[in-house]
Amino acid sequence: MNTRYINPAALYDGAPFGLSQAAVDTASGLVFVSGQVDWDTNYQVKHATLEAQAESTAKNLLIVLEEAGSSVDNILHLRAYIRGELAEHMEKVVAIITRLLGASRPALTGIGVASLATPETLIEIEAVARVRK
């Protein structure tokens, strides 16, 4: 398997954590995007609210997809991890994700979790996509 690793300069460096922002399987054209969070390049959360973090996280996802040669239209599956009881937050998050996706309707899994990368991190979104044809 030939793998191309994606690490956009605009995002934090995943190397200290042993990860890349995405890995592209060049044989299949699949793009596996690591969980994106609302971090700046110094690993600090930029926003305090779930809504603002979701917007920022979605923008980071788009940056990774673009650098991988993909786009929102090529997302096959999204998985959103939300701190706390999922049902309490889905309405807010779904509105943001729907705006991100436009007409695209990939498979989506939402998971409520007790913790994420830092205590301030409220949402993490990962994806599987394919490269543009």
Image: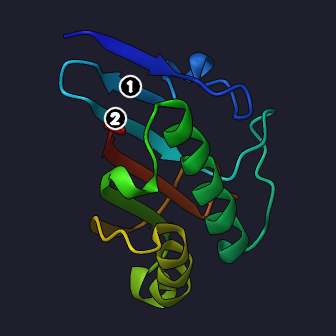
* Residue position for label 2: 31
Residue 124 numbered tag: none
Local secondary structure at mark 2: strand
The numbered mark at residue 23 is 1
What's the residue type where badge 1 is placed? Answer: Ala
Residue at the extreme front: 133
Instruction: State which tag comes first along the sequence, 2 or 1.
Output: 1
Q: Are marks 2 and 1 in contact (CB under 8 Å)?
A: yes
Image quarter of the N terminus: top left
Residue depicted at 53% across the width and 53% down the height: 116
Estimate the x, y position of residue 8 in percent, counting from the top left. Answer: 64, 28
Query: Does residue 92 appear to the left or right of 77 in the view shown?
Result: right
Residue depicted at 58% across the width and 16% down the height: 15
Q: Quadrant of the C terminus?
A: top left
Front residue (pair 68, 11): 68
Q: Residue drawn at (79%, 44%), measured in percent from left and top?
A: 44
Q: CA distance from mark 2 to mark 1?
A: 6 Å
Q: Is 27 on the left-hand or right-hand side of 35?
A: left
**What residue is drawn where x is 61% and y is 67%?**
54
Vertical relation: 6 (above or below) 128: above
Identify residue type, mark 2: Val
The image shows residue 3, relative to residue 61, as above or below, that is: above
Q: Out of 122 and 93, give the one closest to the viewer.
A: 93
